[in-house]
Amino acid sequence: MNSEGSLIDRIVQSAAKQLKKIVLEAGIAESHGLGHMLAVLENLKRALASNANDRSRIEISEGRQLALQLGALLHDADDKKLFAAGSNNAVTIINSVMDEFSDGLKMCSINPKKVEAEAMETISYVSASDNGN
């Protein structure tokens, strides 16, 4: 695996560890708990792998792949059905892992602010309550 890929894996694993702590502290039911969030992440990873193996694939930068994975993982981290209004768990976790891995991100030319913005945008697209579902 290339260095960016292993960096992305380490970043997402760190985010998942932080998310696990928040979910456990909040007593979130498993239907929307960590298992569900990790399943959504795995679905996204399968889609990325499928794209990478397709001859007509769409080029997705390492930074965008990281943003998509963080968005998939954290899609329910601030769900108003699960957390208090004004919760900012997703952006807090994203900022934390961007700081933790800042040297590696620089070496790979991945812009942390762009990753944060794209991850939060991804979350906004999949939010059922925000999109009328």
Image: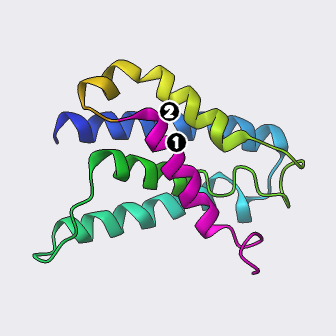
Query: Is 36 situated left or right of 24 in this image?
Result: left
Span shown in magenta: 111-133
Q: Residue extending furthest right?
A: 84
The x and y percentages for residue 76 are 69, 57
Q: CA distance from mark 1 to mark 2?
A: 15 Å
Residue 95, how many percent across, how many down? Answer: 57, 30
Relative image position of residue 17 (x, y in whole percent): 57, 35
Point out which mark residue 14 bears: 2
Residue drawn at (68%, 67%) of the image: 127
The percent coordinates of residue 133 (x first, y second) are 75, 81
Q: Amino acid at mark 1?
A: Glu
Which of 86 and 15 lies nearest the eye of the viewer?
A: 86
- In front: 112, or 55? 112
Question: What kind of secondary structure does the magenta stretch mostly adopt?
Answer: helix
In this rendering, the answer to whether 12 lies above or below 53 is above
Which corner quadrant of the image does residue 63 belong to?
Answer: top left
Residue extending farthest to the left is 55
The foreground one among 80 and 35 is 80
**Residue at disc 1, secondary structure:** helix
Q: As displayed, is residue 59 above or below residue 86?
A: below
**Side of 7 relative to 133 (left or right):** left
Residue 29 numbered mark, or none: none
Q: Secondary structure at mark 2?
A: helix
Taking the spot 83% from the left edge, 43% from the top edge, the residue there is: 26
Query: Which residue type does callout 2 highlight?
Result: Ser
Is 114 within the magenta?
Answer: yes
Quadrant location of the N terminus?
top left
Q: How is the protein colored in the picture?
A: rainbow
Q: Is residue 114 left or right of residue 84?
A: left
Specify whether residue 89 is painted magenta: no
